[in-house]
Amino acid sequence: MSRENCTLLPMRTLVFLGLSLLLGSALKAQLVTTPSNNANNLVQNVLIGQGVSAFNVTYTGSANTLGSFVNGWMTNLGLDEGIILTSGDLTAAPPPGSPVTAFASTGNLGGSNALLASLIPGYTVNDAAVLEFDFTPESDTIKFRYVFGSEEYPEWVSSSYNDVFGFFVSGPKPFPATGNYVNQNIALIPNTTLPVTIDNINNVSSAYPQYYVDNQGLGGLTIVYDGFTVVLTAWLLVVPCQTYHITIAIGDAGDTAYDSAVFLEKGSFSSSAVEVAVSYNNPYLTIPFAVEGCQKAVISFNTPFPRFDTAWIYIDSIYGTAINGTDYSHIIDSVLIPPGGNAGAIIIDPIIDNITEGIEYIFIDVQTSICSLSDTTLIIPIVDYNRIETVSTPDTLLCGEVLQLITSPTGGAPPYQYIWSPQSGLNNPYSSNPTYTSTAYDTLQFFVEISDSTNCSYAKDSLLAIFRPPPLISFMPDIYEGCDPVTVNFTNNIWPNIQSILWDFGDGQTSTDPNPAHTFSYHPDTATGYRVEVSVVTQEGCETSYAVDHLIKVFNNPLAGFYADPDSTDLKNALIQFNNFSTNDVVAWNWDFGDSLSIDNTSILENPTHEYLEAGIYTIFLEVLTEHGCWDTVSARVKIVEELEDSLIFPNVFTPNGDGVNDYFVIDKLETEHYLGRELLVFNRWGKMVYEASAYVNQWDGAGLPEGTYYYVFRYDFTFLGLTFPKEHSGSVTILR
């Protein structure tokens, strides 16, 4: 691709290309970059490592040219995470983590930089990104690791386009040199004074191809740049505790196309100061303590890279409630790091004294920085020897053939090792919870030995197991279902002989009778059947239970009901409609109309009709059945009269003398269902009212009145077949005593 073509791609093509690469590369592990405008945070929390303090951080460059990167361990970059500076745009498509087949070329409108221009005379520098800060080293050397990559590779090697970067340091030179470094570039090819450039490291014309990664030739899937360097180290001899200034810069050279970037490894900007840390040597113990006889404390002293000379690290003081040489093996007050080495250690080895002392502490003050007089205080707690304690299966009576052995140790240093004996019959004698299968009903003693991973704690335990035959439960009901209520007789067939038995009938009722009878009632919650459970204890003390779900079914009884329409009529209208309103799943109806003279005296219809041919009072019976044969009956009467007429007969004399014969004024055929609003008024011969009754039902006995003739008025409403007729009848009656 020509440089002109790369800058004239239509926007639509670029967007499509970027999206395609993003979607395709989402399936691969890629470098992830995040732009940031907080340069101080990137320097302090990402770049700076051990032995260096940084301050006065500034950044000059366009937006989105500075940021962080992660996920490098899954790429061929060689660095896991850190800071990235680019001459392009981290937010443009494609991002730096795209496949090499993508193409990063963004002019970000950044300016030039004189320090970069000084490395490549005759070139114009554009799109510069410049990170600067002051720092103070704590030893005589500073170092950091980096990778430089570019889209200029390999087509534009030794051309008029030569993207450039540099690390420029200013500050005092160490003895025996005099004066200061002034923008000393430390981005150099190893063991040379040559700057790292596209023209100096490549696989086309360079003498240093060993430092070049041909990403394009490898078909890289995780880094967009066609080529980049291997991981290189920039370093410089310095004066400890003095202030230096560094300028880290990158830019395009010759035009603004074809992006380049420099990757700075996280935490690698360091000096050979001492870092101290406390660890514990038992990988199975999670507590951060030294433990008597079980876990040692290791105090490690490390420098970020090997020393050129011998280094002694001196401990200022050792004190605390734990006594040196008494509670732990004696330690000296210094640590040696030999030339070429970068680590030393002190071992705290607690002594087992079998005395319960609780937590004791060791305090160690050590100066880790030559630029500061303050000490780092290390705190190492020591705890007592912790023996293994066990909680195992107690001595037990086993009703059956299989025993689960259980032990739950605490203390010591997990994981634990187990040895059970005797081993015959055990499925796994080296498990914490093996099972034993007995071949006879006998008595056995089991033993277990427990040790931990450090062999610093050891325990034994045992248990006695008595094997007895389990009860075999069987029982039988005489019936399994019926209509509410159902009385069931149970018979048990249990072996061996039982000491006690408990029946649970599933309705809240129980029994201790060996062969009980129990009455079950219908309940909608147990429509699928009652659960019956039997629990027994044998004469040898073995307990077990057995239950059968849905064993006894109780069916709901129907509730019979009907009404006759009409329930009273005359022979002219004697066709009666019978309306069933029975409930609870009725499936059959048996009617008896009480009409013995009719050949159609019965019916099996749900809502039948029947015509009566003679007057009379008839009793009708209805029997209903459910699908399970449960039944109920109900009866009612209908009245058939010859014809619809008012047929009252009034007496003209009555004899209220207490002989039980004709003692009341009785109106014959006075039936309350047809005669409503019954009112009787009685007057003497002078027209004075002597008796009055509402809802009269033949109760006047002439009390308090002398013999003689009296006059009456009887008012009433005659009702029949839904019709009502108001009526009045008057006459005279004689009282004789």
Image (cartoon, rainbow, N blue to C red):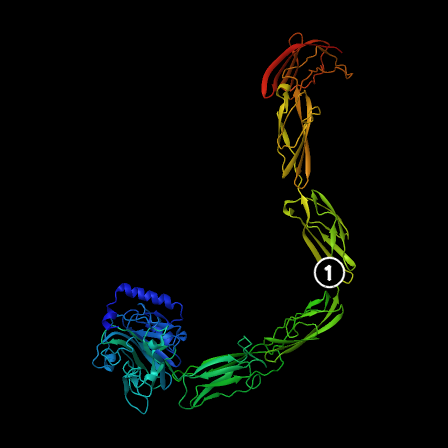
The foreground one among 506 and 59 is: 506
Helix, strand or loop for disc 1: strand
Tag 1: residue type? Glu
Quarter assignment of residue 190 = bottom left
In the figure, 110 relative to 622: above or below? below
Task: Report the side of 696 relative to 202 (left or right).
Answer: right
Q: Is residue 345 visible?
A: yes
In the displayed structure, would residue 525 be above or below residue 88? above
List x then y, in percent, for residue 34: 35, 69
Per the image, the residue denoted by label 1 is 543
Q: Position of residue 99 (x, y in %)?
A: 35, 71
Q: Could you classify mark 1 by the number of other residues whose Cα lies within 10 Å: few (under 14), some (14-19), or many (20 or more)?
A: some
Left-right relation of 20 to 286 = left
Taking depth in this image into account, of 318 and 369 the one nearest to the observer is: 369
Image location of residue 479, percent across then percent down = 73, 47
Residue 234 visible, this orientation: no
Task: Classify residue 41 by image quadrant.
Answer: bottom left
